[in-house]
Amino acid sequence: MTLAAPRTPIARAPKPASKARSRRAGKPKRRKPDPIKAWAKRLARTRPGLVPFVLDGLAERYGHPRWERRLDPTSELILTILTQNSADVNAEKAFEALRHAYPSDGPVERHQPGPGWGGAGLADGVAPDWALVDAAPLAELVEVIRPGGLPNQKAKGIKAALQSIREARGDYSLEFLGDLTALEARAWLTAINGVGVKTASVVLLFSFGLPLMPVDRHVERVARRVGLLSAKASAEDAHEVFLALLEPDQMHEAHVNLIQHGRAICHARNPAHELCPLRERCRYVDPKAP
């Protein structure tokens, strides 16, 4: 009996993808809009002229503060760490104690705190010897800076910062940051464990005049009440919002005058609305203010 040759299977053409699937595959994904830029555009559209209104109103009351370097950047960094969750006057006591306990042979510095500072200002003196501070036993450093408040937390932060700078640079100088762009310098500082955006922005603004906007509790409170910041903006986002709203040469004046306004008039409790130059457009005074 002759066997029949096996049948050759018929090749079947692949099923065409559905039109809907083809369209999805070929259509590029839509990028989510940047919420910071979207907020800046929305504010310009819905409340035109609000930013110059705020800046001009504050300048009329508090003037145009002139930028001056306050301290060398390493001293500014350590002093700023000492101010965290403490009054500026207590941070000054702790920094003076560092000078006394770990004296250096460097040049005498004159602290130029300016009107945004909440303390009396440091006496003229040399910066502490940061190598001695770095090498000091933690328990010893805690006792030295105890007048500044939260000494255990801050001593660890100071030692971590100094160690990071030494390991990255071979010494304790941060002068090189002045040769970077503002965002590059901020990124370098915030890579140090415990140094946040606000602390880095303070150091870079007041040591180099780099166009960054430190947002402390006074700045944030006034900005939220007036409506420069949205209700949903986090404290971290607030720094980016100001970079989108302000010109580089407006950062220093805006920061200093918003702090002064928060201390003098726009208090956390019982703000003095009758004295406020921003009340006509303040959403805290009138939720429907233009």
Image: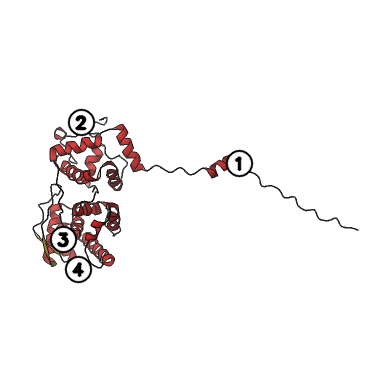
Identify the residue under disc 4.
131
Across and down, in percent, residue 207 comes to: 19, 55
Q: Residue at x 13, y 40 (%)?
A: 62
Q: Residue 247 or 39: which is nearer the viewer?
A: 247
- Work out whether mark 1 precedes mark 2 in sequence or the reverse, and give the earlier one: 1
Q: Amino acid at mark 1?
A: Ser
Q: Quadrant of the N terminus?
A: bottom right
Identify the residue under disc 2.
280
Near mark 4 (Cα within 10 A), the count class, few <14, some 14-19 or many ≥20, is some
- Residue 53 image-quadrant placement: top left
Q: Nearer the viewer, mark 1 or mark 2?
A: 1
Identify the residue under disc 1.
18
Cα separation, mark 4 vs mark 2, equals 53 Å
Q: Kindly state the secondary structure of the residue where label 3 is placed.
A: helix
Cα separation, mark 1 vs mark 2, equals 59 Å
Q: Amino acid at mark 3?
A: Arg
Across and down, in percent, residue 169 comes to: 26, 65
Q: Kindly state the secondary structure of the residue where label 2 is placed.
A: helix
Q: Residue 54 or 133: which is nearer the viewer?
A: 54
- Work out whether mark 4 precedes mark 2 in sequence or the reverse, and give the earlier one: 4
User: In the figure, 263 relative to 122: above or below?
Assistant: above
Q: Are marks 4 and 3 in contact (CB under 8 Å)?
A: no
Q: Kindly state the secondary structure of the residue where label 4 is placed.
A: helix
User: In the figure, 39 relative to 76: above or below?
Assistant: above
Q: Residue at x 35, y 39 (%)?
A: 38
Q: Nearer the viewer, mark 3 or mark 2?
A: 2
